[in-house]
Amino acid sequence: MTAEFTYAFPHRHLLGIQGLNRLDVEQLLDLADTYVDLSRKRVKHADVLSGRTLVNLFFENSTRTQSSFELAGKRLGADVVNMTVQTSSIKKGETLIDTAMTLNAMRPDLLVVRHGASGAVKLLSRKVDGAVVNAGDGAHEHPTQALLDALTMKRRLGDLAGLKVAICGDILHSRVARSNVALLNLLGAQVLLIGPPTLLPKGAAEWGAELFTDMRAGLKDCDVVMMLRLQLERMDGAYLPSTREYFHFYGLDAEKLACAKPGAFVMHPGPMNRGVEIESSIADHVERSLITEQVEMGVAVRMAVLDMLSRNAAERPNGGPDQELDREAPR
Amino acid sequence: MTQRFAICNARLIDPANDIDTIGGVLLEDGVIVEAGADLKSASKGVETIDAGGKIVAPGLIDLRVKTGEPGAEHKETLATASVAAAAGGVTSFVVMPDTAPVIDTVALVDFIRRRARDTASVKIYPAGGLTQDLAGAKMTEIGLMKEAGAVLFTNGEQAVENANTMRRAMQYAAGFNALVMSRPDTHSMTTGTMMTHGAFADRLGLKGAPPQAEWIALERDLILAEMTGAHLLVDQISTARSLEIVRVARMQGVNAACTVSAMHIFFNELDVGDYLTYCKVFPPFRDETDRQALVDGIAKGEIDALVSAHDPQPPEDKRLPLAEATYGAAGLETLLSAALSLVHNDEVTLLQALKPLTCGPADLIGLPQGRLSPGAPADLVLFDPDTPWACNREDLRSRSKNSPFDGRRLQGRVLRTWVDGVTVFDASAEMAAR
């Protein structure tokens, strides 16, 4: 006779992959799997969030992540409000915390936040009563992206343990890379980070990844090649001589992809710079590219995250913070 | 009428005279008449304060304090900083010139001196700007400002980028025996950084300031000091290698001294932890081996002055994402406790800890205080090195409460502070008033 194992998701917010354990992740991925099925039905509706308010608070422009969260919330029956806070309101003098307090007074149950500064979402989460989902903070974390990448790979390749996954491009400024390294390590995959020397932080060796500046060497025997967007808008100096040279050494084309395992899959968090980090023929390759599939998984994963966090929120009748969850050291 | 009183039954710590003994101090008209073991008990006919075996030391001298006066009085004034200083056992401090306007003319040096005299309870000495408006282009009237009472010349947080401007300023200052304090920083490498460069910053996704930026600028300034014969005070070194660079330059005869901030002997990079903006300071907290090397430097007497690097900043500049928050931490009231933490860890002796807080800085800027010598001003502090306390920023007296020590458990509290024989802080009176 086996004892029944129960495990309640113990987090109030989802601020990063750091801080999650394997059970947390598997629970989220399993739940997300069911939401993939729901999303493929003609009537894509569940009512687990009916009556709940979801606010998308984006301090950085984003079309895909914001609409993905919006759809996720709506498919679960939540009332969704999108707020894009332009940087101009910061110039007007309102601080992040003021914005957070104002919103909090409107009693949202779930807050999805993206901000250009690392750590900003965590700062905001301390000031609100609802559950906060980090939709990307600076160069720190983007946990739902890592989860949707994991779900995409899992559905194609099964167990991730032992897989070789290469992440290529601007590692230095990438929150996607940081969250993915953490998550892939948690699930037992081997991670290789590939990028030009100026965009590959030395400290990344301590994250649990091997570093390569030679893309061909790094791609050897890889099961999955994850390309990152070259974030031109973040370059405050001369990290690179030209996009032409970048494509020559780090752009994914058929020839470089041939260094990976035959049939290796290609992923990209989007939006793509075609001809800068990825050749169009690869991006659109029917058998190899999982890029549109990632977008589909994104909605399912975000449904799972919202659902899971709202279950914890349900145990707080007054909407106040639940002290038992994510207890922080007193400071 | 002469004012005469004695403090007896004290443990005297006087690094200038290498004294650590049970004894007392006799004061008259704000000047020390006698100090030593002979004054152990109360003498007849003299008002006597019993120190109860606690420590009496020269009042602390802090070479690096920022206030908001003039220009940003909502952060701190000379008066509010002096209240914080007195409570921290600091009886003399030097204020930085990076105010609005910049202290770069005789009139402004005079303004600071007059405001200090009229409003502050401790001694405040102005530092003059090294270049006009701290723009790094033209030197200031160093000679005239020195005559007016500026004790050192510095470009504040901004290193002078142009090597030739720095060279000429140092050359000129050398002729007037003026002390030049420079912040070793290669700004092009550190602009927009939030903590020290390294694996931890990479993981947090924060832009880091590499220690190399400090070493490059430090080497340049030491070479220029050697070239010009200027007396150089290196402002807040933060790494082991910086200490080594200073050590080598001194062996080669360069007239150089260095300071370390008390925060940098207490915290390391990991304290930035969950993006704590109170730990966003410049230079940033470095790694643990660097912190240990600085502590070792204090034990060996290689750090000439320990500074608070007091930089009051209000919540609107600190309660922000780390990238947007301003640099700086309030430090006057935790200076002594931070230094005592090294004593409690058995890393340095009391004499070693107090030397860079008393006669060390006094000698750099030529002050008679900072020692228990007969004839020296009676600037004294009475403290219990063992009293445990938890730092709560709301209880700080500084107008801004941005202390990285908030929530930390510390040891050692000031009981009483005298400036020229006059009590400027008395913990028991404060307690009674509450």
Image (cartoon, coloured by chain):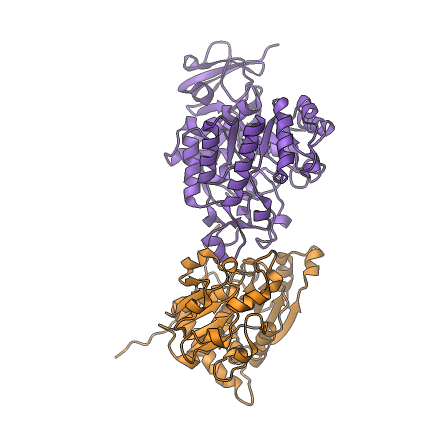
Q: Is residue A68 visible?
A: yes
- Residue B421's x, y, as percent? 56, 19
Examine the rendered structure and indicate whether residue A240 appears above or below residue B41: below
Q: Position of residue B325 (x, y in %)?
A: 60, 50
The quadrant in which residue A104 appears is bottom right
Q: Colour of chain A?
A: orange
The residue positioned 45% from the left and 78% from the top of the image is A265
Chain B shown in which color?
Answer: purple
**Which residue is outermost to the right?**
B107
Does residue A48 appear in the picture of this structure? no
Residue B102, x across and y down, in percent: 70, 36
Q: Is residue A204 above or below residue B406?
A: below
Residue most toward the left?
A: A1
Closest to the observer, A43 or B190: B190
Is A26 left or right of B189, judged from the image as shown? left
Residue beneath the point at 41% across and 63% down:
A209
Residue B10 x/y as whole percent: 43, 21
Q: Nearer the viewer, residue B240 or A108?
A: B240
The answer to whether A52 is drawn above or below residue B333 in the figure is below
Drawn side of residue B297 relative to residue A73, left or right: left
Q: Nearer the viewer, residue B397 or B349?
A: B349
Q: Quadrant of the N terminus of chain B?
A: top right
